[in-house]
Image: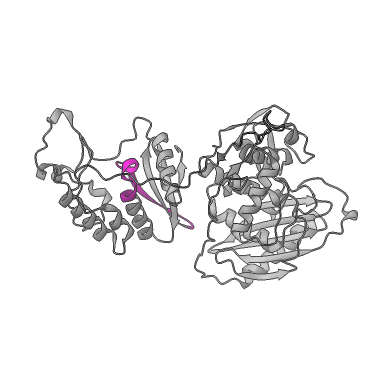
Amino acid sequence: MLIAVPVSVMAAPYAAMVMDARSGEVLHAENADTPLHPASLTKMMTLYIAFEAVEHGELTMDTMVTVSRNAAAEPPSKLGLRQGQKIKLRYLVRAAAVKSANDAATAIGEAIAGSEAAFARRMNRTAKAMGMTRTNFKNANGLTESGHMSTARDMSMLGRHMIYDYPQYYNLFSRVTTHAGMREVANTNRRFLGQYRGADGIKTGYTRAAGFNLVASAERGQERIITTVFGGRSTASRNAKVAELMDLGFKRANTRVALRRPGKPPYLGNKGLGDVLVARSADPSPDGARGKTIRVVSAAVTRSLRPQSRPGASGTDVAPLVASVEGDIETVLAAVQTAKVAAEPAPVQVADASDVAPGASVKPMRRPKGIVLASAAAAAAAEPIAEPVEEQEVVTRLSTSGGRHWGINVGRYPSRYSAEKVLLKTALMETSTLDGSLRKVVNRSSGFDANFMGLSRETADLACRRLQARQVTCFMIGPS
């Protein structure tokens, strides 16, 4: 929350929405499309863009942010940042998510976009891409400003995106306390988190103009409900109203509903700030001509050239096979391996059986020179290798030595089969960086994570950048 004032001065308009988070179905709405002051609910968008920026390599959670005079001067609630101070992005994120610190939110926006005004433009582009049609942001923290407005419906949509687009960060909003680099801070939503069964986030907001706002989420069994309230008259009365609406949502929601994640908005980076910046000299040159025009193109990656085929490859290409995968994993693997053998006669080297479904027919496939992936039986049956034996290394399982403790995640899927299928397609698509990694499916409560493990940090970063350039969702997984 922003600044506490006596309840007696409150007279903010009221609005509410209850949504089934799994499907996006609206279960209850009151004044849901009325533009109102969102207060610190704004920080959900600030944090969403911070997570997006980290995902796409604009910066990392360990990037040192220099605090500006503008950020340090923000009014409470605040972390107490000082002008010129350097602090890691992760601590600013924690302070904005948990304590709702205004100075931290402003510092995040300036670190990503260069200025708070430029960051607000990026916030609005992202909101529009999400379908938040009645929202207009003017700043990164939610302090009252003319034209800075949103609705209960739009904030419910934003909360849903936060849950499903960046689940790896969502736990921030359920922390009762956290360390924000300078000191331990307490969650502004700790009362509701402690009082309502299943509550796990997400964000409070308060200003004199807005009243007491809250976007809350709770999960019970297979059901998850998002409730948004604008214009509460106190923390206690607002929490009571949210609890009442949560109960209504769980009562109305069907137990068995197919999970339909919201479509993730396209990544545009800081485009529109704009792509082309034109700078002209203030005074004309002596001969009356205008000053130089300088064209600066946005550094965001918009296209990645596909790697060239290996020397000696014939007309048979792996890419069409990847693009047309319709059958099961065994069929795809056999087809690709057959095509590679036909195109490139080479020493026979057999894949590790742990990567292949039971009963699958494993055909020979080409591996990088000097490394053979083989089981003992398969190695015995393989053709002789041209190079001397002492120059080769036989690998029977993934090694985690040499700093290969990193991985990447390429999505969460409703079934193990779907996750395995995506892993195979991705491995075939990005052979240069993922070759030799371990395909691993992790069963989570909300689905199956498709992971590649056993990479160095540099390789994981490169793989994610290349996949993201192909519009494939990807984020890095650090050492556990």
In the rendered image, the vertical position of residue 67 relative to residue 166, given as above or below: above
Specify the farthest residue to the front. Answer: 287
Q: Residue at x 11, y 35 (%)?
A: 386
In the rendered image, the vertical position of residue 17 relative to residue 419, given as above or below: below
Residue range (magenta)? 427-446
Q: Residue at x 28, y 59 (%)?
A: 329
Q: Can residue 196 be seen in this view?
A: no
Q: Residue 367: which quarter of the image?
A: top left
**Magenta stretch: includes residue 376:** no
Where residue 19 appears, x then y in whole percent?
Answer: 63, 66
Q: Is residue 385 visible?
A: yes
Query: In this figure, what is the number of numbered marks?
Result: 0
Pick the residue in front: 237 or 195: 237
Q: Which residue is drawn at 90% across and 54% down?
A: 9
**Magenta stretch: includes residue 435:** yes
Pick the residue in front: 298 or 399: 298
In the rendered image, the vertical position of residue 224 relative to residue 120, given as above or below: below
Q: Residue 132: which quarter of the image?
A: bottom right
Residue 98 shown left or right of residue 321 in the figure: right
Which color scheme is applied?
A: one colour
Q: Which residue is drawn at 37% across and 38% down?
A: 455
Where residue 480 appears, x then y in whole percent?
Answer: 45, 38
Where residue 324 appears, x then y in whole percent?
Answer: 31, 61
Pick the residue in front: 29 or 138: 138
Where residue 341 appears, x then y in whole percent?
Answer: 16, 50
